[in-house]
Image (spheres, rainbow, N blue to C red):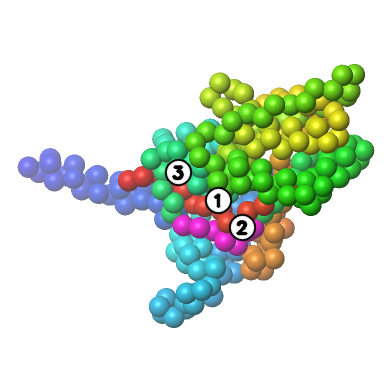
């Protein structure tokens, strides 16, 4: 009996020593900053918003869009972990190496719809974002061709139509779009990642499908160039451009920081790395979702 009690005491002591007072949070790698810089900015934001929490939480304005995030951030410190691919981040969540993952709302909703093992913890409304194509510094000719095509697609409703068909009103797995072939035309290599489904989606057989093929097929047709798709991890986007493996990267994220309270985080939410120029945005979302494992 004494041995049992001693063992129980040791277990309780060990549990108290190793009990976490923080939340391990996974996000896709931001190429314009380091994990350490992002963590410093997030900790600084935590200090900045702490005074905003009223002593009596019942007095907090119901309509305040930052409510859930501010409350959660102050109560639980986030320790950020960068992941170069969505797959590696999901594996870390499944194996409980991290407690949650942070994803754009359309991506999070797609994963939850297709995976019963995920739950939404809460919504993060403070960092609305857009995504753009990335080009190697100096490739302004191709950048302009994409900009003109995207602007025309926005004006004539094509962007909205494709967004509804392949993202917001998608039912089931997205399907591939066919690419127009132009004889003797230039071929541009476009890197897709599969790390933002269904925005950037690669099917189980390794074939890019859905919104990424739809929008690139339309742009290729409008600029009269052949498009060849290659796959890279999201963390390798800039390297693919720098090495010449790709002429275009399917997405770089630009985050609107005006809603972030004054803190260092405003200065480190950067996705595009040096040496990359961007197109005008072609898709946007207002909310990120915090995804956890189902209990």
Q: Earlier in the sequence, mark 3 or mark 2?
A: 3
> Does label 2 or label 1 sit earlier along the sequence?
1
Q: CA distance from mark 3 to mark 2?
A: 18 Å
Q: Which residue is mark 2?
A: 286
* Rendered view: 14 above or below 259: above
Tell me the SS state at disc 2.
loop
Which is more toward the observer, 205 or 72?
205
Vertical arrangement, residue 119 with respect to residue 44, above or below: above
Outermost front residue: 156
Q: N-terminal of the two: label 3 or label 1?
A: 1
**Residue at figure coordinates x 46%, y 57% from the top left:** 122
- Residue 211 in percent (x, y) is at 65, 37
Q: Are circles 2 and 1 on residues that touch, CB within 8 Å?
A: yes
Which residue is located at x 87 percent, y 19 percent? 183
Q: Residues within 10 Å of mark 1 (few under 14, many from 20)?
A: some
* Number of the label disc, if any, that sits on residue 105: 1
Q: In the image, residue 152 lies at what x, y percent? A: 82, 47
Query: In the image, is 185 to the left or to the right of 292?
Result: right
Residue 197 position within the rendered picture, expressed as x and y whole percent measured from the top left? 58, 38
Q: Secondary structure at mark 3?
A: helix
Depth check, front residue: 217 or 285: 217
Residue furthest out toward the top: 184
Q: Counting other residues with Cα less than 10 Å from the Cα at mark 3, is it few (<14), some (14-19), or many (20 or more)? A: some
Residue tagged 3: 112
Q: Which residue does the image show at 63% across and 54% down from the upper left?
A: 285
Q: Is residue 200 visible?
A: yes
- The x and y percentages for residue 251 are 71, 40
The boundaries of the magenta stretch are 122-128
In the displayed structure, does residue 45 sit left or right of residue 151? left
């Amino acid at each position: 009996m004494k041995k049992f009690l001693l063992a129980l005491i040791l277990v309780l002591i060990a549990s108290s020593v190793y009990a976490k007072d923080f939340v391990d949070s996974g996000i896709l790698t931001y190429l314009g900053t380091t994990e350490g810089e992002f963590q410093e900015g997030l900790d600084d934001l935590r200090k900045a918003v702490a005074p905003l929490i009223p002593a009596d939480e019942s007095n907090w304005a119901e309509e305040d869009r930052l409510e859930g995030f501010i409350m959660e951030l102050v109560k639980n410190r986030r320790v950020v972990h960068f992941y170069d691919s969505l797959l590696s981040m999901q594996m870390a969540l499944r194996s409980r190496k991290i407690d949650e993952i942070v994803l754009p709302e359309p991506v999070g909703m797609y994963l939850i719809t297709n995976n019963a093992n995920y739950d939404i913890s809460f919504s993060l409304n403070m960092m609305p974002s857009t995504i753009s194509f990335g080009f190697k510094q100096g490739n302004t000719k191709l950048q302009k061709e994409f900009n003109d095509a995207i602007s025309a697609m926005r004006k004539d409703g094509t962007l909205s139509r494709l967004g509804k068909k392949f993202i917001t009103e998608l039912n089931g797995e997205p399907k591939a779009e066919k690419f127009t072939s132009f004889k003797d035309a230039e071929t541009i290599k476009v890197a897709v990642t599969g790390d933002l489904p269904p925005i950037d989606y690669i099917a189980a057989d390794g074939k890019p499908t859905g919104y990424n093929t739809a929008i690139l097929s339309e742009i290729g047709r409008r600029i009269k160039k052949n498009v060849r798709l290659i796959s890279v991890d999201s963390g390798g986007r800039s390297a693919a451009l720098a090495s010449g493996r790709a002429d275009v990267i399917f997405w770089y994220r630009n985050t609107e920081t005006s809603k972030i309270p004054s803190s260092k985080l405003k200065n480190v939410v950067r996705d595009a790395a040096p040496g990359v120029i961007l197109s005008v945005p072609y898709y946007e979302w207002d909310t990120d979702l915090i995804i956890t494992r189902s209990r």
